[in-house]
Image: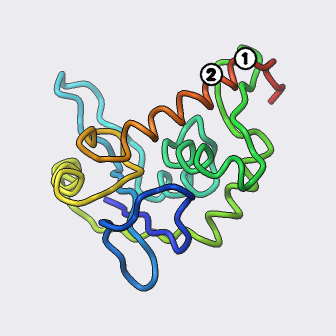
Amino acid sequence: MYAWYFTAPPPRVPVDRCNTAHGAVLLYVGISPKRPPANGGRPSRQSLRTRLRYHYRGNAYGSTLRLTLGVLLADELGIGLRRVGSTGSRLTFSDGEAVLSEWMAEHARVCWVQDPQPWLLETRLIEGIDLPLNLDQNTHGGFHARLSAARARQRELARSMPALPR
């Protein structure tokens, strides 16, 4: 399980009830690998290292954290979600992904803990503390509706523009 702290939270994110440590505020938690499928299917082979690397240097298509941060920081960083690729079905911040990575390098901190069943710990944390950037399992969070709406607006805007080549 990993936890993301931010030294400068994105604008309009409510942080007054969030946990803080060493001058940073905890806004998001995640796990890797994900819960094994109940149907006996193949479990995820993703490691904590690959997941964290993708959050730091990947794109919004593969990281809900990057998608959320990019949406919340779009105006401040001058970036916007766009359709990319030949089918235009992938949504990323295109060239803005590098700008977002720079912002994260300056303001994001991550820590982790090993647990044999991280999905249970993740559920307990999301239910027990305020984590405004988590959407999954967090409909009780006061920021959920506003964040969901902001992400939907960015997706709608991206889908209204022509797709960019990869």
Q: For mark 1, what is the residue?
A: 160
Name the residue furthest top. 87
What amino acid type should be assigned to the residue bearing mark 2? Glu
Image coordinates for residue 99, horizontal then vertical, percent: 75, 56
Give the residue displayed 74% in from the left and 26% down from the top: 84
In the picture provided, is 155 more to the left or to the right than 136? Answer: right
Look at 44% across and 69% down and name the residue there: 5
From the top left corner, tell me how far across and down residue 60 is, in percent.
60, 40
Residue 31 image offset from top left, x and y in percent: 33, 51
Q: Position of residue 150 (x, y in %)?
A: 53, 36
Q: Residue at x 53, y 28 (%)?
A: 152
Q: How many C-alpha atoms fall within 10 Å of the one at disc 1: few (<14), some, or many (≥20)? A: few
Other residues around mark 2 within 10 Å, as few (<14) / some (14–19) / many (≥20): few
Describe residue 117's horizontal placement relative to residue 164 as left or right: left
User: Which of the 4 quarters of the picture holds residue 103?
Assistant: bottom right
- Going by the image, does 137 lie left or right of 6? left
Picture layout, residue 156 above or below residue 78: above
Q: Nearer the viewer, residue 9 or 56?
A: 9
- As helix, strand or loop, the secondary structure at mark 1 comes to loop
Query: Which kind of residue does numbered mark 1 sit on?
Result: Ser
What is the CA distance from the residue labelled 2 to the residue labelled 1?
6 Å
Q: Secondary structure at mark 2?
A: helix
Taking 20 as reference, is 97 above or below it?
above
State yes or no: discs 2 and 1 in contact (Cβ < 8 Å): yes
Q: Which residue is mark 2?
A: 156
